[in-house]
């Protein structure tokens, strides 16, 4: 029961922190903000953050599969 609560808070924390991330390189930021078009800069930033999510999800899924394999192996032993 306690592990489910901890998992919920970890997932909630990761979800809430993803909205405040800024993942833009300095050169991209400078070129986009120098034009005065902040909407375009925000769109590029959102796209970069969106693309960064998938490697973390992939690592999380692989980690979960490995965890499940070890727990099932312990149950059968």
Image (cartoon, rainbow, N blue to C red):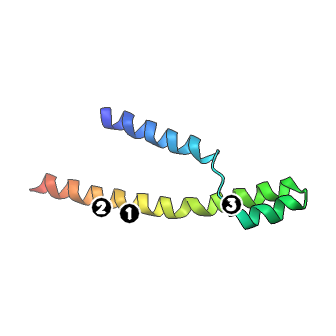
Q: Residue at x 78, y 54 (%)?
A: 42
* Cβ atoms at labels 1 and 3 below 8 Å apart: no
Calculate the distance from the C-alpha at mark 1 to the C-alpha at mark 3. Answer: 27 Å
Residue lying farthest to the right in this orientation: 36
- Residue 1 in sight in this render: no
Height in image: 64 above or below 7? below
Quadrant in the picture for residue 63: bottom left
Earlier residue among tags 1 and 3: 3
* Residue 22 in picture, x, y percent from top left: 66, 53
Height in image: 17 above or below 41? above
* Cβ atoms at labels 1 and 2 below 8 Å apart: yes
Compare residues 69 and 59 and report the one nearer the observer: 59
Q: Which residue is drawn at 37% across and 36% down?
A: 6
Secondary structure beneath dot 2 equals helix
* Residue 69 in picture, x, y percent from top left: 25, 60
Q: Residues within 10 Å of mark 1 (few under 14, many from 20)?
A: few
Left or right: where 69 falls relative to 65: left
The residue under label 2 is: 66
Left or right: where 14 falls relative to 62: right
**Residue 62 - label:** 1
**Residue 24 - label:** 3
Compare residues 54 and 45 and report the one nearer the observer: 45
Secondary structure beneath dot 1 equals helix
Q: Which residue is drawn at 90% across and 61% down?
A: 35
Q: Which residue is drawn at 49% across and 59% down?
A: 56
- Residue 10 in sight in this render: yes
Calculate the distance from the C-alpha at mark 3 to the C-alpha at mark 2. Answer: 33 Å
């Amino acid at each position: 029961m306690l592990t489910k609560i901890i998992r919920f808070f970890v997932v909630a924390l990761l979800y809430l922190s993803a909205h405040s991330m800024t993942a833009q390189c300095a050169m991209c930021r400078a070129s986009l903000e120098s034009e005065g078009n902040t909407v375009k800069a925000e769109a590029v930033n959102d796209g970069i953050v969106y693309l960064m999510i998938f490697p973390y999800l992939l690592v999380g899924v692989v980690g979960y599969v490995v965890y499940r394999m070890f727990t099932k192996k312990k149950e059968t032993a």
